[in-house]
Amino acid sequence: MGGKKVCPDVKKAVELCKSIKKESQSGKKLPKYCDEFSKTMVRMKITLYGPELKGDSNPEAVAELIESIIAGDFFEEVLAVFLLLDFESRKDFGIIFNHCCRREIKNSIPIITYVQKSDKVTELLLKGYESPEVALITGSMLRVIFEDLEVVRKLINSALFYSFFKYVADANFDIASDAFSSFRDVLTRHKDLIAQYLEKNYDAFFDKYQGLLTEGNYVTRRQSLKLLSELLLDRSNFNVMTRYISDENNLKLMMTLLRDKSKNIQFEAFHVFKVFVANPKKADAILKILVLNKTRVLQFLDGFHNEKEDEQFADEKQFLMRQIEGLPNEV
């Protein structure tokens, strides 16, 4: 610790986590340790937020706590036994974790720098999506650390990133929805980084992503279509968009989804389909499909979601119909 004071509550919490882990392996009951751990979390919150939990904390005590967290691998120790803790302890730990990751202490290493270098914190948080009891709490912690560019950079360059494709398609609605919120954060928060990643890993990423559009449940498919539209229309992803809308298989998929039994899926597919049609430099394969289906597509769009009272959508639909009408009759 280089002569720095050790926060007794952090030290106590780490010791309790080790005891909880040991006792759980032996099959013994854990209430004694878990109750003590809960009290420790409350004391740590008071250190961070002050006696009334209103933010009037002691800067020296907070700095001591932060230094102790880093030195004692506190986050890893707690997350390793997270499922064994009671709900209030998990919730309080989440509050402490999120607060520490966002707080900068003068003359102290930022906690987020520690998280960047850790090989375990992000992994343990992601694994939280495998357990309904903790998924929403660990998900909130993930989204806090994803605010940091270097944490996201490390994640997308590891095999861990692809675990998202499993979690966002989970049968449990709450898990799938929360995982998708975290997935979306990764893909939209640091635009230049993700644009570079998608260009470099285009095939691997979109092979997986197409599975979300075709095999996922209704919620996953709808969210995935909406996110795809957002990614394609973002200026940072111009090269990725150009490649995506030059692939005839992608166009065929969108034309299929336009006829999905769900009107919401149809609507989200429309916003991806329009990118193919609006492209002034259509690939030959794309142009051929649109020309061959010109009459049918126009008839389809003419009756597409006419019940919607959405002026922007109506304008976009009319624009697409004019674009298609202007295509040659044969290629």
Image (cartoon, rainbow, N blue to C red):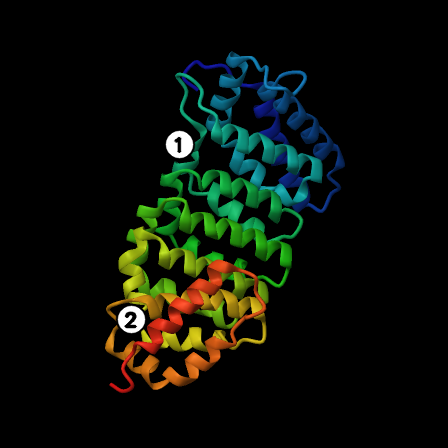
- Residue 87 or 301: which is nearer the viewer? 301
Above or below, comparing residue 163 to residue 71 in the picture = below
Q: Secondary structure at mark 1?
A: helix
- Residue 55 coordinates in the image, percent (x, y): 59, 19
Picture quarter with the N terminus:
top left
Seen at 45% across and 57% down, the residue is 227
Q: Are marks 1 and 2 in contact (CB under 8 Å)?
A: no
Q: Which mark is residue 298?
A: none
Residue type, numbered disc 2? Ser
Q: Badge 1: how crowded within 10 Å, few (<14), some, or many (20+)?
A: some
Q: Nearer the viewer, residue 211 or 302?
A: 302
Q: On the rendered structure, is 305 left or right of 151? A: right
Report the residue at 41% width, 45% height from top.
189
**Cα gap from disc 1 to disc 2, whole angstroms:** 41 Å
| Disc sitting over residue 113 in the figure | 1
Task: Answer with the quarter of the image where residue 61 lies.
Answer: top right
Q: Residues within 10 Å of mark 2 (few under 14, many from 20)?
A: some
- The residue singled out by tag 2 in the image is 246
Q: At numbered mark 2, what does the secondary structure look like: helix, strand or loop? A: loop
Quarter holding residue 232: bottom left
Residue type at tag 1: Thr
Q: Nearer the viewer, mark 1 or mark 2?
A: 2
Quarter of the image with the C terminus in it: bottom left
Name which of mark 1 and mark 2 comes first in the sequence: 1
Depicted 157 relative to depicted 51: above or below: below
